[in-house]
Image (cartoon, rainbow, N blue to C red):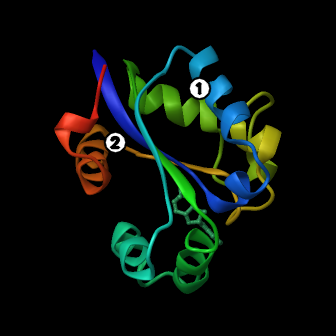
C-alpha cells in the first residue's frame, strides 16, 4: 500500500553537508520526498520526540546530539514506505548496517547514525503530525 513515513536527517549528517547525498539514496530507492524542512530542534521538542527512550541510559546524550545542529525533517511517500525506508537506512548501529545503506555509507556511530525513520505505520502517523500540518505535505 502507498504509505508515508517520517524521516529525520540528523545533526551529524547536516553538519557534514550530506542532506543531498542522503536524499539521493531515498529517491533512488523509490521514496518521494513529499514534505521537507530544515529546523533546529529545541531540547523540549527533542525530549518529547524521543520520550519512549526516556528511561534508557543514552537518552540525555541522544537529546543533546539532536539539538547540536539543525536537522532536516521530511515525509517520505511510496509503496510500503515505512519498511522501505528502514531497509534503506540500514541497522541502527552502522557497524551492523548492510552495504549501500545510508548508515553504512554515512553514519559515524550508533548515536550519530545520520538518520531516523519511523518504525511502524502507527508511529509514522504520530511522528509526521509531530512536525507537519497536513497542508504542508504535497504529494
Ligand atoms: P533512532 O532511529 O533515531 O532512534 C533512537 C536513537 O537512539 C537511535 O536512532 C540512535 O541514534 C540512538 N541509540 C539507540 N541505541 C543507542 C545506544 N545503545 N547508544 C546510544 N544511542 C543509541
As drawn, 80 above or below 128: above
Q: Residue at x 54, y 85 (%)?
A: 60
Quadrant location, ligand no. 1: bottom right
From the image, state whether disc 1 or disc 2 is nearer to you.
Answer: 1
Which quarter of the image is occupied by the N terminus?
Answer: top left
Disc 2 is placed on an element classified as loop
77 is higher (above) or lower (below) than 19: above
Q: Is residue 8 left or right of residue 131?
A: right
Check disc 2: other Cα within 10 Å, few if <14, some if 14-19, many if 20+.
Answer: few
* The CB of the residue at mark 1 lies under 8 Å from ligand 1: no
- Residue 80 location, quadrant: top left
Q: Position of residue 110 (x, y in %)?
A: 71, 62
* Spatial separation of the CA atoms under disc 1 and disc 2: 18 Å
Say whether marks 1 and 2 touch (CB < 8 Å). no
Residue drawn 28% across the image and 38% down it? 121
Task: Characterize the local packing of mark 1: few (<14), some (14-19) or many (20 or more) Cα atoms within 10 angstroms.
Answer: many
From the top left corner, tell me how far across and down residue 9 is, in percent: 58, 49
Residue that numbered label 1 is attached to: 26
Which numbered disc covers residue 3? none
Name the residue located 45 percent from the left edge and 30 percent from the top edge: 83
Quarter location, residue 21: top right
Q: Which mark is residue 120?
A: 2
User: Image check: 26 left or right of 22?
Assistant: left
Q: Residue at x 58, y 75 (%)?
A: 62
**Quadrant assignment for the C terminus:** top left
> Sequence order check: which comes first, mark 1 or mark 2?
1
Give the SS element for disc 1.
helix
- Residue 100: image location, x then y, percent: 77, 27
Decide: is 13 above or below 121: below
Q: Percent from the top left, x then y, of residue 31?
A: 49, 20
Amino acid at each position: 500500500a502507498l504509505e508515508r513515513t517520517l524521516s529525520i536527517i540528523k545533526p551529524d549528517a547536516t553538519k557534514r553537508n550530506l542532506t543531498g547525498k542522503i536524499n539521493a539514496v531515498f529517491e533512488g530507492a523509490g521514496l518521494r520526498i513529499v514534505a521537507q524542512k530544515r529546523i533546529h530542534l529545541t531540547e523540549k521538542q527533542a525530549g518529547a520526540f524521543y520520550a519512549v527512550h526516556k528511561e534508557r541510559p543514552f537518552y540525555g546524550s541522544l537529546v543533546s546530539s539532536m539539538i547540536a545542529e539543525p536537522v532536516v525533517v521530511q515525509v517520505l511517500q511510496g509503496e510500503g514506505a515505512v519498511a522501505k525506508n528502514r531497509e534503506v537506512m540500514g541497522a541502527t548501529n552502522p557497524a551492523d548496517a548492510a552495504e549501500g545503506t545510508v548508515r553504512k555509507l554515512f553514519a559515524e556511530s550508533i548515536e550519530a547514525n545520520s538518520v531516523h525513520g519511523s518504525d511502524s505505520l502507527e508511529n509514522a502517523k504520530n511522528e509526521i503530525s509531530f512536525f507537519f500540518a497536513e497542508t504542508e505535505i504535497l504529494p
